[in-house]
Image (cartoon, helix red, strand yellow):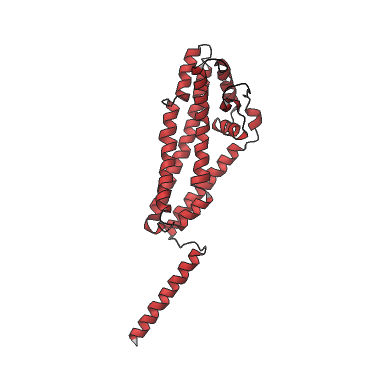
Amino acid sequence: MKRISLVLCISSILILLLVMFISCGLGCEPLLSSRAQKAYNVLKSKVDRYRDGLAVELYSANIMSNVIFKDNSYPSALLRFEEENTRRVFATTLGHDSGVIRRLTEIMNTLSLKGDHAEDLDIAIGFFKQLTTVTDLAIRLLHRHLSQINLARLRNSLMLELDFVNIINSIVLYLDRFMKARVDIISKIKSLIKTAAAKRGDKRAMINDLKALSSVEGEISKLILDKLVDNAFKIEHRLSITFKWDN
């Protein structure tokens, strides 16, 4: 009799677990401990806040008036700002600061960009690539790697049972580092633009300053690689390790 009762008890438990498993498979969110739920809420709150802030930056009402540098005769499409998204990214990286954009316009007018002046053109193109990279990386991180879909996958991933809190905390750490570094890099870029613009009377000195902005071995490029690309890669790596268990 005891054996029958035990079998019935075990069967009931197994049936209950099966029902829970099927329910979760149909869309029910997994149960998390209060500590794990708190960690997830912190991550989602930060991602939402950063994403909303970036959207405000990208869709500022002042974009068309602040982007005062546009010349359709430049040989590089990047310098002509033909696409609205390029203009938005460009202005966003410079904080929609019309004063800084005006200084940059003066710098571009000092460079020889329409003739056989490869060095000047390379510097200008390299610099604008850096500008777009700073904001493009943030867009990719917040709207692709940390999209709403991926956040839901992260919460529902089977691997969460193994090390949920540590996974979330590490992503939050790398995310905060990325966003702080982006602010610092933008500030650095604006400062370097002002410094270079002040040297327009000495073109060679101005170009030497611009190389810190445009060269792949320059200061800004190293900051982008060490502070933005590295932290974005760490987040992507953590997500890829987690998601491989729920495929």
- In the picture, measured across the screen, residue 44 lies left or right of residue 233, that is right
Residue at 42% across, 43% down:
174
Q: Which residue ends up furthest to the top in the rendered image?
A: 201
Q: Position of residue 7 (x, y in %)?
A: 36, 81
Can the viewer see residue 231?
yes
Foreground: 115 or 104?
115
Instruction: Estimate the x, y position of residue 135 in percent, counting from the top left.
Output: 52, 35
Q: Position of residue 143 (x, y in %)?
A: 53, 45
Report the front residue among 193 and 4: 4
Quarter that holds the N terminus: bottom left
Specify the quadrant of the image occupied by residue 4: bottom left
| Residue at (42% x, 33% y) in the render | 225
Residue 115 horizontal/vertical position (percent): 56, 15
Query: How many tags in the picture?
Result: 0
- Residue at the spot x=62%, y=30% of the render? 82
In the picture shown, does residue 157 fall above or below 101?
A: below
Query: In screen coordinates, is 217 left or right of 87?
Result: left
The vertical placement of 143 against 65, above or below, is below
**Residue 173 visible from this viewpoint:** no
Decide which of 66, 16 is in the foreground and name it.
Answer: 16
Q: Quadrant of the C terminus?
A: bottom left
Looking at this view, name the residue that lies furthest to the left: 3
Image: 180 above or below 115: below
Residue at 41% across, 74% down: 14
Is 70 in front, or is 2?
70
